[in-house]
Every structure is written in structure tokens, then in C-alpha cells.
Amino acid sequence: MERCALLYDSLIKASESLGYTWGVGSKGGFVRVGGEELLITIQERIKRFDIPPPPPKPFQPGQRWEPDFTAMRAARFGWEPTGVFSLIVDARSEVLIQKTWTDSKTGKLESKIGQILTGFVRIAASVIAQRLSDEASRRRWAEEERVRKEGIDQQRRLDKLRQNLMKNLESWECAERLRAFIRATVEASREDEATQMALAMWVSWARQQVELLDPLKVDISKVIELSVDLPNSEYGCWSSSKQADDWWP
């Protein structure tokens, strides 16, 4: 702890002489370089060692055996400090930017203060470059997503128009068949007065029903309308490829 405090003290004093400022945030201590806050942590490497299991309790002749829960709950390994410190800068930057300095054969961290301060500048510049790259990627993704959704909507609009076209065609064909059937019924009817009176009433009713069925008679503006309302739906991984069972001829 004493060495860590001294290391922080040397680092803060040296960086403040260059105009950098330090502070403490919700995630820990940070240094502000060129307007960028770089989270700084100092960690010590620790080494794991095995703890030998405790010797079994002596077992007396005639004694009933019972499980030794104390031995089962005993720690199997422990940790010991190594004195090897690492200074780590936590920041989203470009790759291949050094953000960790560690005690090594070339020197302790105290002798690398100059390298670390130079590294702060490089990391801050890299953070800015990475942010600009991220923003460009987000804009590119947003544009690609807009184009993708626009393509989906265009295909959905085309599908809807084709469905309306086929529906109107089927209604019109049905109306034409009914008209032909009405004419055939008139031609096949007897000439007596009672039949003709009943026929006239039926023909009048049947023709009214045909008028309601024929889209060209009901509202031709709806037949030639090219604007459609698309229901809201999730886009997901939609594919515009024509399916094998597509209803369109």
C-alpha cells in the first residue's frame, strides 16, 4: 500500500506539471488528458499456492467412524503477494495502443513515469480517434439499416398492391360470370306471365348484388390506387428473395 501511494503521488505530481488534472469518479481515479478521462488503476500480481490438507484425526479402536467436515471445508489454496505492480489505463481506444505498464527486468514503474506520461497522450488521442471511428460506424450502420428497411417496405408495398390487384381481378371475374349466368337464366326462362314477373324481380336483385361485387362499379378509384397503408411490424432478418410458394404468377 505504501509503495502504491508513493507511485500515485509521483505520477500525479509529474502529470500535473504538464497540465493534466486528476479526479475520482464512480469507477475510480482518473486523469484528464486533452479533455479525455482515462481511468487509472494499479494492481499487484498475486501468486496462488496450495495448502496441504490437514492430517486426519487419529482413529481409536472401536470408535464409530464419522465424516470429518472440518477437513472437507478447509481451504485448498491461498494467495501471496509478489511485489510486481502494473499500471493499467482503462479506456476504449484503437488496438495496438499500449495501456499497461508493469514492473520488469528493464525497471520498476517508478522509472517508467516518463513513458507512462507519454502513453497518456497517445491513449487520449487514440480514444478520440476511436470515438470518431465509432460514430462513423454508427452513421454507416444507421444508413444501411435505413436502406434495408426501405427495401423491405418497398417489397411489402409491392406485395400488398399485387394482392389487391388479384383480389379485384377475382371479384371482377366473379361478377362477369354472374352476369353471364343472369343472361343465361333469362334466355332459359319460360315465356308465361308468372315466370316473367318472378324473373324480372330476381334479375333486378341479382344485378344489384353483382354491382356490389364488381370493383369497377363499386369504386374504381380504389382499384387504381397505388398508395397502401403498411401495418407496423418488426423488420428482423427479412429477405427479399422470391419464395418458391409465392402466390404471384
Image (tube, rainbow, N blue to C red):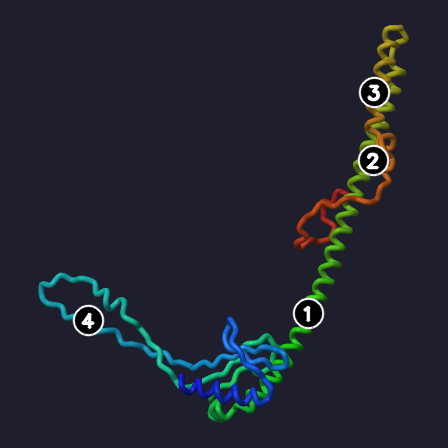
Q: Residues within 10 Å of mark 2 (few under 14, many from 20)?
A: some
Residue drawn at the location 87% of the way across and 35% of the way down: 220
Q: Is residue 249 visible?
A: no
Disc 4 vs disc 3: Cβ atoms closer than 8 Å? no
Mark 1 to mark 4: distance in Å?
Answer: 64 Å
Q: Amino acid at mark 1?
A: Glu
Answer above or below: position of 41 versus 245: below
Disc 2 vs disc 1: Cβ atoms closer than 8 Å? no
Q: Sequence order check: which comes first, mark 3 or mark 1?
A: 1
Residue placed under numbered mark 1 in the picture: 135
Residue placed under numbered mark 2 in the picture: 169
Residue placed under numbered mark 3 in the picture: 206
Q: Closest to the observer: 12 or 39?
A: 12
Disc number lying in front (2 or 3): 3
Q: Amino acid at mark 4?
A: Pro
Q: Sequence order check: which comes first, mark 2 or mark 3?
A: 2
Residue drawn at the location 84% of the way across and 10% of the way down: 198
Q: Amino acid at mark 3?
A: Ala
Disc number lying in front (2 or 1): 1
Q: Position of residue 246 (x, y in %)?
A: 74, 45
Count every numbered label the image shows and give the total. Answer: 4
Q: Sequence order check: which comes first, mark 1 or mark 4?
A: 4
Disc 1 vs disc 4: Cβ atoms closer than 8 Å? no
Answer above or below: position of 71 versus 226: below
Residue placed under numbered mark 4 in the picture: 56
